[in-house]
Image (cartoon, rainbow, N blue to C red):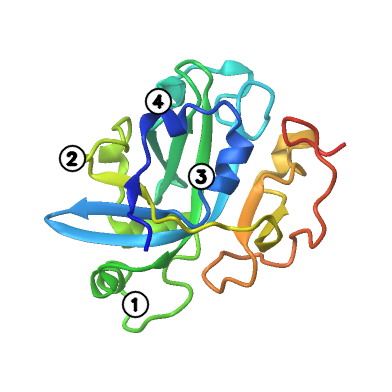
Amino acid sequence: MNEAKLLSQQYYLNTDVVALAKDLLGKHLEVWSDGIRTSGIIVETEAYRAPDDRACHAHLNKFTKRTKTMFEQGGTAYIYLCYGIHHLFNIVTAPEGMAHAVLIRATSPIDGLETQLLRRKTPKRKYDLSNGPGKVSQALAITKQYNGTTIFREDDTIQIWDHGTIVQPDKILAGPRVGIAYAQESCNLPWRFRLKDNPWTSKPNNVFYTDWPALDAYGNPI
């Protein structure tokens, strides 16, 4: 059995955020809150990349009170409120100043299932427990209080671990990201990734490519 390893800061400094969004699939997201550990396998992600990606909060390197966290070094948590309700957890990637990030869209629960059910006010284990970014944060108690914190130190509240699971390329589906119709030419980029046939992934689940489109070195369709 492979020994689990905490992902290092060097891992997150990769400038290819699209590749990282795919590589994070199968990794374990762990959170310590009030002395309780809860965790889940990452089964769906989305990549965002400044300055050219119109769907990215830091499009054209826009620097604001909210986006300043995105310009931090890779391995920083970027957490913001969506519609004033849902906390969305993103991982800042690349060196300081590049404003790339990966949104964690869905997890398959592992540790602390009962706690996750209570937090989500779900009496039974169902696939919609953590099949959306807001649900993930609620189940794992990720809130804006952790925005700007690191996730690569052994005493960090939020951590991501590699348990040696190798996800083959044919087990990854790619499709357009969700809720970004305003992003014009960026809205169809196939930068949303999910594990094939995994029931914990989010909806809509019928917009993924069964055959990967041809992409350039930056993940854009050719």
What amino acid type should be assigned to the residue bearing mark 2? Asp
| Helix, strand or loop under label 1 | loop
| Helix, strand or loop under label 4 | helix
Q: Which residue is mark 3?
A: 103
What amino acid type should be assigned to the residue bearing mark 4? Thr
Residue sitting at x 67%, y 29%: 53
Considering depth in this image, is 105 or 169 the residue closer to the camera? 169
Residue 57 pos. (x, y %) = 55, 30
Quadrant position of residue 37: bottom left
Q: Earlier in the sequence, mark 4 or mark 2?
A: 4
Q: Residue furthest front?
A: 1
Residue 173 pos. (x, y %) = 69, 58
Gap in angstroms between the C-alphas marked 1 and 2: 30 Å
Q: Which residue is mark 4?
A: 69
Q: Which mark is residue 122?
A: 1
Q: Which residue is mark 2?
A: 155
